[in-house]
Image: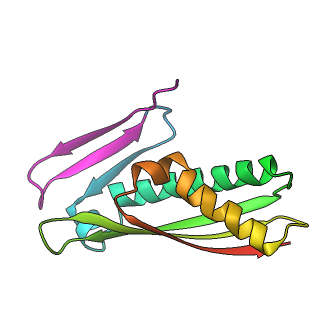
Amino acid sequence: MPIRSAEAVWKGDLKNGNGNLKVESGAFEVPYNFASRFETGKLTNPEELIGAAHAGCFSMALSNELASAGHNPQSVETKSEVTLDVSGDGPEITKIHLVSSAHVPGIDKDEFMEIANGAKDGCPVSKVLAGANITLDIELKN
């Protein structure tokens, strides 16, 4: 059972501090700060990285489910829009909206939608983020 890891270092207080995020594989090490998370700063933020993980997980899960059902997915492209609500009792990820398209020749639209919704609910990242309202808009290209 693989265990994946990432690291974060934060220096200073919340508003004026800054930090770095890096992943175990060495694929990236990136800076982040208050503005990039709660305003419109140009650096990355945890929600953006959650979005990347969710888009990647859903795309892989959908491809797997389609292949398991006997269909050959040629491509799946997914964007994840993560909403960080800063009202109320403090910041909370309240919604994740997946926008996807898949090129799957020869599949019926109803079967495709059933498989896509199953992949949305069943991918490991969706499961861990189940506290948020996860929605899906998907287009079938065949």
Q: Quadrant of the C terminus?
A: bottom right
84 is higher (above) or lower (below) than 1: below
Magenta-highlighted residues: 1-23
Q: Residue at x 72, y 48 (%)?
A: 64
Left or right of 85 in this view: 138: right
The residue positioned farthest toward the right in the image shown = 106
Q: Residue at x 70, y 76 (%)?
A: 139
Q: Position of residue 129 (x, y in %)?
A: 40, 54
Q: Residue at x 77, y 60 (%)?
A: 75
Q: Position of residue 132 (x, y in %)?
A: 36, 63
> Which of the pair 35/83 is nearer the observer?
83
Q: Residue at x 46, y 50 (%)?
A: 127
20 is higher (above) or lower (below) than 141: above
Q: How was this image coloured? A: rainbow
Task: State yes or no: residue 132 in magenta.
Answer: no
Instruction: Examine the rendering and report whether any part of residue 45 can be seen.
Output: no
Task: State yes or no: residue 6 in magenta.
Answer: yes
**Which quadrant of the structure image shows residue 59?**
bottom right
Q: Position of residue 81 (x, y in %)?
A: 46, 70
Left or right of 113 in this view: 27: left
Instruction: Examine the rendering and report whether any part of residue 81 can be seen.
Output: yes
129 is higher (above) or lower (below) than 38: above
The residue positioned farthest toward the top in the image shown = 1
**Which quadrant of the structure image shows residue 5?**
top left
> Which of the pair 101/10 is nearer the observer?
101
The residue positioned farthest toward the left in the image shown = 13
Left or right of 104 in this view: 82: left
